[in-house]
């Protein structure tokens, strides 16, 4: 084999490796994506789990976007004054999308409850090097340990249930803020802080799991 052919083959191999890596990363996405790989039953249930994960994340991120705009108006209120009509509109949008998030995650947990696990995926979750992964990615202890406490036991259903619980907690606090804004009263700052904390925690919770699930993609979920 001449040098030119060797170089051509090498280029092809490199291109294939790059495409594989891009494909793997594209499926990691944001919140709990590829969690459907933990379930071995195909067909309608498998498709539903994947759809619920994607839809739930989409509604959540959209709600967070509206809430960040709301917080922006709160932050700038000392300079620009308060437009309660605008704040109500942003808050109602955030609540509406969070209601959809909660409803989607409820259906996700119910579907997962009656869908069998993928044994290969669960085995990898049980044997995964969580400590090494945490160190490599630089995740903090508190949220990472909570995610790991479920996944290292292969309890993906439990992980989904926590997403639902976090969503419910955020929604409850959003309604507390709504009570004030609906009567043109400035919302309690401590409640806003806890809402922002809840959004941030839930987003990171889902992201950590998505990254862990994606490490098994090439082997367990084609």
Image (cartoon, rainbow, N blue to C red):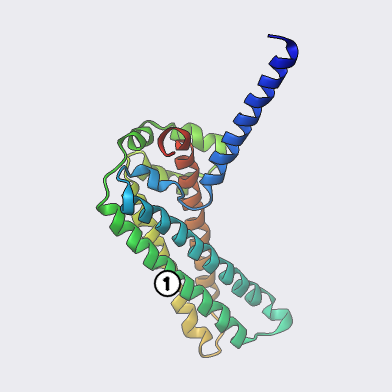
Secondary structure of residue under mark 1: helix
In the image, taking residue 12 as reference, residue 44 lies left or right, namely left
The residue indicated by pointer 1 is 99
Q: Is residue 32 above or below residue 76?
A: above
Q: Is residue 84 above or below residue 58?
A: below
Which quadrant would the N terminus be assigned to in this image? top right
Q: Residue at x 46, y 70 (%)?
A: 98
Outermost residue to the bottom = 183
| Image-quadrant location for residue 166 | bottom left
Outermost residue to the left = 114
Percent from the top left, x then y, of residue 125?
37, 36
Q: How many marks?
A: 1
Percent from the top left, x then y, of residue 106?
34, 63
In the image, taking residue 45 as reference, residue 177 lies left or right, namely right
The crowding category of the residue bearing disc 1, from other C-alpha atoms within 10 Å (few below 14, some 14 to 19, many at least 20), is some
Percent from the top left, x then y, of residue 66?
57, 71
Percent from the top left, x then y, of residue 75?
66, 73
């Amino acid at each position: 084999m001449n040098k030119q052919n060797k170089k051509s083959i090498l280029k092809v191999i490199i291109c294939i490796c790059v495409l594989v890596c891009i494909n793997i990363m594209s499926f990691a996405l944001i919140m709990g994506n590829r969690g459907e790989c933990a379930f071995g039953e195909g067909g309608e249930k498998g498709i539903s789990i994947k759809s619920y994960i994607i839809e739930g994340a989409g509604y959540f991120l959209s709600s967070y976007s509206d809430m960040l705009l709301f917080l922006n108006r709160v932050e700038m209120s000392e300079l620009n004054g308060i437009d309660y009509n605008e704040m109500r509109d942003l808050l109602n949008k955030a609540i509406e999308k969070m209601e959809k998030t909660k409803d989607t995650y409820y259906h996700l947990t119910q579907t997962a409850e009656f869908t069998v696990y993928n044994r290969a995926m669960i085995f990898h979750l049980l044997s995964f090097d969580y400590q090494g992964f945490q160190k490599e990615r630089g995740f903090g202890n508190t949220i990472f340990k909570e995610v790991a406490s479920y996944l290292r036991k292969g309890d993906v259903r439990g992980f989904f249930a926590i997403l639902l619980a976090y969503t419910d907690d955020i929604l409850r606090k959003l309604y507390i803020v709504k009570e004030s804004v609906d009567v043109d009263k400035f919302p309690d700052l401590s409640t806003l802080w806890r809402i922002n904390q809840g959004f941030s925690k839930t987003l990171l919770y889902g992201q950590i799991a998505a990254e862990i699930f994606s490490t098994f993609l090439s082997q367990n979920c084609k």
